[in-house]
Image (tube, grey):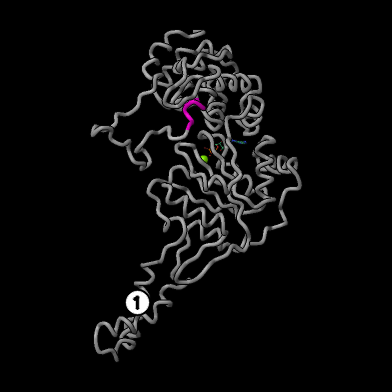
Amino acid sequence: MNPTPSYEFDSVEHTISRLAEVGYLADRRLATTVYLLTRLIKPVLLEGPAGVGKTELAHALADSTGRRVVRLQCYEGQDESRALYEWDYGKQMLYTQMLREKIGDIVESSTGIAEAIEQIGSHDDVFFSERFLSSRPLLEAIRSEAPVVLLVDEIDRADEALEAVLLEVLAEGQISIPEIGTFVARHAPYVVLTSNNTRDLSAALKRRCLHLFLDYPDADRELQIIQSKGTGLGDAVAEHLVQVVRGLRELDLRKPPSISEAIDWARTLAVLGISELGTAELDETLSVVLKYDKDLARAREQLAALVQGEIPEPASVPAQVDAATEHAPADREGRTVRSAKDHPGRHGPGTYGERSQPAVDGQPARPRVSTGQGERSFTSKFRRRG
Ligand SMILES: Nc1ncnc2c1ncn2[C@@H]1O[C@H](COP(=O)(O)OP(=O)(O)O)[C@@H](O)[C@H]1O
Ligand SMILES: [Mg+2]
């Protein structure tokens, strides 16, 4: 593989400014990872909640380096033929139909079926050649004439078998097709993998990647991002909006608002001509950022605190160590709530095809219940504010 020397970034600062030129505001930590990606030609794995700019980073990297994005969008049940390559069965059939006479000539001299099959079989390589090969994203990235950014998006949605397929491609930078041979990348792709963290990825995959956890940005950066999108919202109200969004993230919501939702909210407020954010304005437009009834109800209970920029108490942080996770909340902030949910195996046995718990003394094991469960309704009664 030949790393492409042109278009590379000179330094971390250069990476920050080039990404900013194409509308992506990266902090130093992220820019360092991207800089290393382009220098070490190592894949980057970005893990983090939805809507924090993981996918967008791949596009920004492509725009700022003059590369095209080849995207593999992962989903459950995806098999390798959808990720690597497929034989174009329809085209093979069409050619067979058109060549019927020729095939007739080939088998004409045969005395039986076995011999006829042998004779046709000797022409296998014609039908299993590049002409009949349909490249899927991974092969497309490897075969591309021009350098590309390979985006493997939401890898956590795919099954672990697909991770194994990926490993080969990432480690070798090549794809072997038994009938044809090995394709080696002309230009090493810049590989960006993203995960919304719904399951744990294999250690082998993580080992091969530069790994970065991308969380919600700090208030200044989030404000900059919103302002950079030309939402039409005034600076003062945008600043207030960022505070409110950050307050919402401290509530234990099923789906906390992401950067993209904050941007949508800013646009909505601008269209409505809102120049000051009070409880009424908040109440009327909350549904732009919160998509679940329970989240809306929870936020509505805290409207006054949110508008004042106070951090409401998360309702469901257990006061003691959660026995199932052995995760003791060090403080009562939303970040702790999120990280407390983010531990290996948090979806329990069986969710991702793991074997369920073994039977004990002939009795099927019962699901473990954390000591924190059931406290929700009680802790929610005691709030710091509101
Ligand atoms: N650092 C950033 N700079 C500029 N825009 C950003 C940034 N982070 C997020 N965004 C905005 O948030 C939107 C959602 O980001 P996206 O990459 O789709 O999230 P994810 O892939 O993490 O779910 C993007 O379309 C972009 O408008
Ligand atoms: Mg995404």
Q: Secondary structure at mark 1?
A: helix
Q: Is mark 1 within 8 Å of ligand 2?
A: no
Ligand 1 location (quadrant): top right
Q: Is residue 283 left or right of residue 63?
A: left
Spot occupied by residue 45 in the image (x, y as percentages of width and height)? 56, 43
Q: Nearer the viewer, residue 360 or 365?
A: 360
Which residue is pictured at 63% across the width and 54% down the height? 67
Q: Is the residue marked by circle 1 packed among few (<14), some (14-19), or many (20+) residues within 10 Å?
A: some
Which residue is pictured at 47% across the width and 39% down the height? 200
Q: Nearer the viewer, residue 380 or 281?
A: 380
Outermost residue to the front: 361
Which residue is pictured at 65% across the width and 33% down the height? 228
Q: Is residue 346 above or below residue 96?
A: above
Q: Identify the residue under disc 1.
A: 96
Query: Magenta span has 161?
Result: no
Q: Nearer the viewer, residue 360 or 196?
A: 360
Outermost residue to the bottom: 109
Residue 299 shows up from this direction: no
Spot occupied by residue 141 in the image (x, y as percentages of width and height)? 55, 58
Q: Is residue 277 above or below residue 261?
A: above
Boundaries of the magenta span: 338-343
